[in-house]
Image (spheres, rainbow, N blue to C red):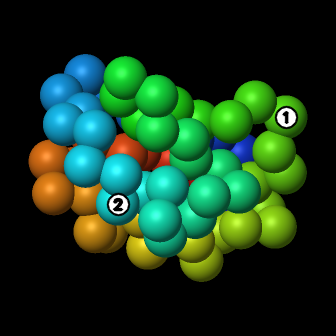
Amino acid sequence: MAITKVWIEEGCIACGSCEQICPEVFKLEETSTVIDGVNYSDFEAGIKDAADNCPVEVIKYSE
């Protein structure tokens, strides 16, 4: 199944890990944000890797 939604829950510590892993989807501002208008199915591996490597486990996605 393709990823259809990506979000970041409260608690982001702005470590920048997600942006380093998948800059096509994540952008670090004051906290990490998800870039609008991205076709998530093109970057599934990066999204899952970013979620798996988030030190505070706030990156979520749904398929």
In this view, 43 is above or below 31: below
The quadrant in which the N terminus is found is bottom right
Under mark 1, the amino acid is Gly
Q: CA distance from mark 2 to mark 1?
A: 21 Å
Q: For this rendering, which residue is in front, 55 or 40?
A: 55
Which label belongs to residue 17? 2
Q: What is the quadrant of residue 34 in the picture?
A: top right
Say which element carries label 2.
Answer: helix
Q: Is residue 5 visible?
A: yes
Q: Could you tell me which residue is drawn at 71 percent across and 67 percent down?
A: 43
Q: Which mark is residue 37?
A: 1
Residue at 35% in and 60% down: 17
Q: Residue at x 19, y 36 (%)?
A: 13
The x, y position of residue 57, in whole percent, is 21, 50
On screen, residue 15 above or below 10: below
Q: For residue 38, what is the image quadrant?
A: top right
Q: Say if residue 7 shows up in the picture.
A: no
1 or 52, nearer to the observer: 52
Nearest the camera: 5 or 30? 30
Q: Residue flagged by tag 2: what amino acid is it?
A: Ser
Residue density around tag 1, few if under 14, some if 14–19, many if 20 or more, within 10 Å: few
Q: In terms of image quadrants, where is residue 45? A: bottom right
Locate residue 41, reporting x and y percent.
Answer: 78, 62
Q: Nearer the viewer, mark 2 or mark 1?
A: 2
Callout 1 secondary element: loop
Q: Is residue 5 above or below residue 31?
A: below
Q: Is 5 left, or right, of 56 in this rendering?
A: right
Residue furthest out toward the front: 29
Decide if residue 63 is on the left or right side of residue 17: right
Rendered residue at 68%/36% (across/down): 35
On residue 1, the disc is none
Q: Is residue 54 left or right of residue 33?
A: left
